[in-house]
Amino acid sequence: MSATVVSIDGPSGAGKGTISRLLAGRLGWHLLDSGALYRLVAYAGLRQALAADDRAGHARLAQSLDSHFGARADGSELILLDGIDVTQGIRSEASGMGASRVAAWAEIRAALLARQRAFARPPGLVADGRDMGTIVFPAAALKIFLVATPEERALRRYNQLKGKDSGVSLAALSREIAARDRQDATRPVAPLVPAGDAVVIDSTGLTVAEVVERVWHLGGERGLWQE
Ligand code: DC
């Protein structure tokens, strides 16, 4: 591995994305949003009208994915697929469910592995996902497993999507989050489990700043950065 990696894994809506972005920003490190890669594969499949169970077709898309992760002039996130802005489109719950479905297929995970590892470049990487600490970066210097109660996660997701995904309701989100948790945790390949050496943080009732501080302190204790 070519750079120090901090992995932040956990279920949907636990706050991994927010915490990872803030931590990477504070450190000036690279950021890997691995969920976005699975979302892009599902999104590209939908766009090409692939059958939902076409594993080979989705695997081909995963291998040849032309994606770009960048930032707009105002600093907000910009994700391109084949040069087209899909930043909003891949965040819908439909893309999330599609991502969870294709992410259960070993050939998709294999096709995305090298692409994910290539994000580990100096000065360091904060990697956000489900299997960052177990499979993609097993030698990560600090592994966090971030959890929160299903109720809190549904509420956070609701607040996040409210303005973007007009059809969204809290009850439907709770059901979808429960279904996605089940699907991600019970799949035979790379199921959602904490690495043996991960530090579990329960963010229920904690503010974003409090969670960032905990991670910051853990990294400081390990000498990854100066507190
Ligand atoms: O983090 P997210 O909601 O954007 O992820 C979307 C789906 O992708 C999630 O339900 C499971 C899958 N995923 C995965 O299997 N492995 C990862 N490292 C990241 C996401």
Image (cartoon, rainbow, N blue to C red):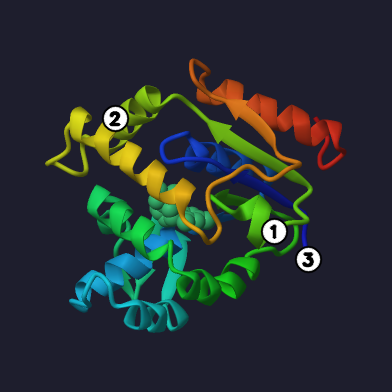
Q: Is residue 3 above or below residue 146?
A: below
Q: Nearer the viewer, mark 1 or mark 2?
A: 1
The residue to which callout 3 is attached is 1
Residue at horizontal 25%, vertical 50%? 92
From mark 3 to mark 2, how far is it between C-alphas?
37 Å
Q: Quadrant of residue 55?
A: bottom left
Tell me residue 181's x, y (percent): 40, 42
Q: Nearer the viewer, mark 3 or mark 1?
A: 1
**Mark 3, other Cα within 10 Å: few <14 / some 14–19 / many ≥20:** few
Of 171 and 25, nearer the camera is 171
Q: Earlier in the sequence, mark 3 or mark 1?
A: 3
**x 53%, y 31%: residue:** 147
In front: 175, or 170? 175
- Horizontal side of 170 relative to 42 (left or right) equals left
When the figure is inspected, residue 17 is found, relative to residue 88, above or below; the finding is: above
**Residue 189 in the figure: left or right of residue 37:** right
Amino acid carrying mark 3 in the image: Met
Choose the circle earlier in sequence order: 1 or 2. 1
For the residue marked with disc 2, what is the amino acid?
Asn
- At x 35%, y 23%, the residue is 151
Numbered label attached to residue 137? 1
Residue 95: x and y, percent? 28, 57
